[in-house]
Amino acid sequence: MEAEKHGHHHLFHGEKKHEKTPEQQLKHHKHMQRLAKVGTVTAGAYALHEKHKAKKDPENAHSHRIKEEIAATVAVGGVVLVMHEHHEKKAAKKKIKEEKKKVNGH
């Protein structure tokens, strides 16, 4: 009811989102890209581990194959995230370069 009275409709009641500078964005996307790479490698390694377990444990092979497929899917999703963060990082670098040109008057 309080939110309706003031016209706010979300949790933070009108707080403005912190705008990141291009340098902060670059740092953030570099960090996220590295994390995505680590996650991708980890998921790929887990998929290989489950593939090996499926061969060694024929009694539970079906369960291991399912886990392998899920891990492989996560690894593919990780690659997509790495590519996305790389693109965002390039955009942040371009923005920094454009701002420097404006400051230098070129």
Image: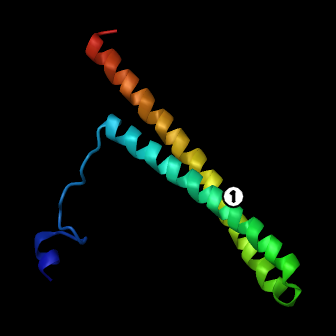
x, y percent for residue 87: 54, 39
Q: Nearer the viewer, residue 5 or 36?
A: 36
x, y percent for residue 59: 86, 90
x, y percent for residue 47: 73, 67
Q: Is residue 77 visible?
A: no
Dot 1: element: helix
Residue closest to the far top: 106
When asked about the image quadrant of residue 96, the answer is top left
> Along the horizontal axis of the image, is 1 left or right of 30?
left
| 21 to 105, vertically: above or below | below
**Label 1 belongs to which residue?**
76
The residue shown at (48%, 41%) is 88
Q: Amino acid at mark 1?
A: Val
Quadrant into which the C terminus falls:
top left
Q: Is residue 102 visible?
A: yes
The residue shown at (17%, 67%) is 13
> Along the horizontal axis of the image, is 37 left or right of 104?
right
The residue shown at (76%, 73%) is 50
When asked about the image quadrant of residue 71, the answer is bottom right
> Along the horizontal axis of the image, is 71 left or right of 54?
left
x, y percent for residue 38: 57, 55
| 94 to 75, vertically: above or below | above
Q: Nearer the viewer, residue 15 or 63?
A: 63
Rendered image coloring scheme? rainbow
The residue shown at (21%, 67%) is 12
Number of labels in the image equals 1
Q: Nearer the viewer, residue 10 or 45?
A: 45
| 38 to 20, vertically: above or below | below
